[in-house]
Image (spheres, grey):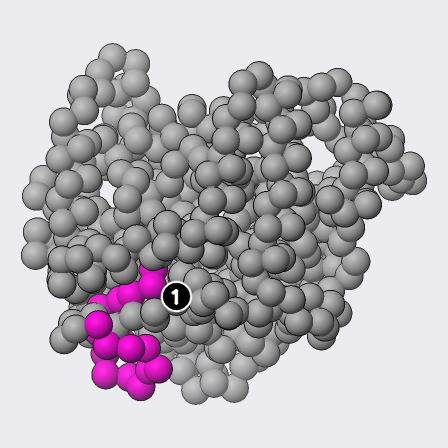
Amino acid sequence: MSREVRSRIEKLIAHGPTDLFAGGRKGIEKESLRVRTDGHLSESPHPLALGSAMTNQFITTDFSEALLEFVTPAYASTWETLRVLCEIHQFSYDRMQNELLWVASMPCVVGDDNDIPLAQYGSSNVGKMKTVYRNGLGHRYGRRMQTIAGVHFNYSLPDAFWPHFHAIENSQLAADDFRSESYMGLVRNFHRMGWLILYLFGASPALCKSFIAGSETDLQEFNESTLYEPFGTSLRMSDLGYSNSTQAGLNISVNSVDAYIDDLSCAICTPEEAYQKIGVKVDGAYRQLSANQLQIENEYYSAVRPKRVARSGERPTAALRRGGVEYVEIRSLDINPFDPVGINQNAMRFVEAFLIYCLLHDSPPLDEKAAMEASRNHSLTAKHGRDPELHLHRDGKKVGFTDWAREIVGDVRSIAELIDAGEGGGSYTEAVNTQAQLIEDPDATPSARVLEELRETGAGFYHFAMERALGHKDYFLDLEPLSGDRLAIYADEAKSSIERQQSIEAADEISFDEYLEQYFSEDGCR
């Protein structure tokens, strides 16, 4: 274990109670495409029985009407978080009639961009803005890329942790500033070491040829319908997916929360020639919110985001400026097709311990060279993570992938043992030990298991995912039906969310043009 981490742990143990790391809050946002029984993207509107996609706190949509997003509150227990995620799946399947939830991060079968319907949020100004933003994403990056799905893990350390950590660090910063600085250190270290998450939990080594749509690629052909990367872990997080070159020119600093806010705000206000050619309002219809580098903050894609719960109508950067970083959002987890809800408790527990390790580890500023090194390590792992000859770079020096991974996992195990000491039992240590086995046996990783099933059956990616989707649907429909208070939670929210959307629409008093003018005037962009 690094000297800094060991020293901090020893001081925390001496200074605070044994349960200092116990009870951190975990929430999940899980995306899933609605598909027809033939595996093609659903073209039907968001099911009314699921409530309003704009205001339902549990069930919304992402880019497309067909891309559902299930959102859990944050709980201290991984079990409670997973239980709610399972219940949301149950509730949705009971109301989706003959449709399926796609079980993989990479979509299939995908037609032309125009066949992918944009998410709709009603007639209010805020609803229209959400749809125009998505239309802009389609023009900028293509709609196919926006059908990629993933699992986002939201995490905050226990409130009781911070006063003790503040004390042992002898920091002169105010409590909120210290917490923000610490979380930004976590973010930087996730950039440095988050490649490990792609290796352990990546599950997208193959994809449908329909996703490439005739474009040139260096992927190998598995069969007439499927392309793959032999040692790939997460094509979703490679340059084929979200980590594309379109935003490569953006330099968003994570060296402080103020620098992060300022850089995002600058990108929202800086014109981009390629986007100016698209146009903003053409023949009376909006193609995008602006022609700037970013339309809004959320357009900037990163594997990790520092966040704060925003108040009604408050922008993400405004929330951060108001109260600092409250939690982090990890965005690099693939959907696990072998788990009905796409993630399991072992994964959640490992990621939690890993994030604490990132926070306690020394985290110097990321200069341009270090940021490029981190980005390259992520890219290499996404496409070649199971290659036994793979080497990464650390502080400018070449290092064996397995050697570095073993080192990190060994340190994360020490964190897991501390969490277990506070919560009782050994579930966190067991979770880390499970992942440690994958370092020694790459063939046991989710990505390798996907390819092994493809080889065993001789089928392509489509048939693999369809078989899993049908099995998962049966799993949820065979569970004891939701009833009583548990059913009421989701049914009442679906009903009241429609009423809330209607209230928002009725309250609008200005035109959409005026609404956008006011929205962007906060940044001084117009």
User: Which residue type carries mark 1?
Assistant: Gly
Is 468 colored magenta in this rendering?
A: no
Q: Position of residue 382 (x, y in %)?
A: 45, 65
- Residue 257 vertical placement versus 517 (above, below): above
- Residue 99 vertical placement versus 499 (above, below): below
Q: Looking at the image, how many numbered discs can be counted on the residues? A: 1
Residue at 16% of width from left, 73% of height from top? 223
Q: Which residue is mark 1?
A: 232
Residue at 37% of width from left, 55% of height from top? 443
In the visual, does 447 lie left or right of 160? left
Q: Which residues are magenta?
A: 204-222
Q: Quadrant of residue 120?
A: bottom left
For the N terminus, the quadrant is top right
Residue at 9% of width from left, 40% of height from top? 97
For the C terminus, the quadrant is bottom right
Q: Is residue 284 visible?
A: no
In the visual, does 383 lie left or right of 267? left
Is 210 colored magenta in this rendering?
A: yes
Residue at 33% of width from left, 47% of height from top? 336
Q: Secondary structure at mark 1?
A: loop
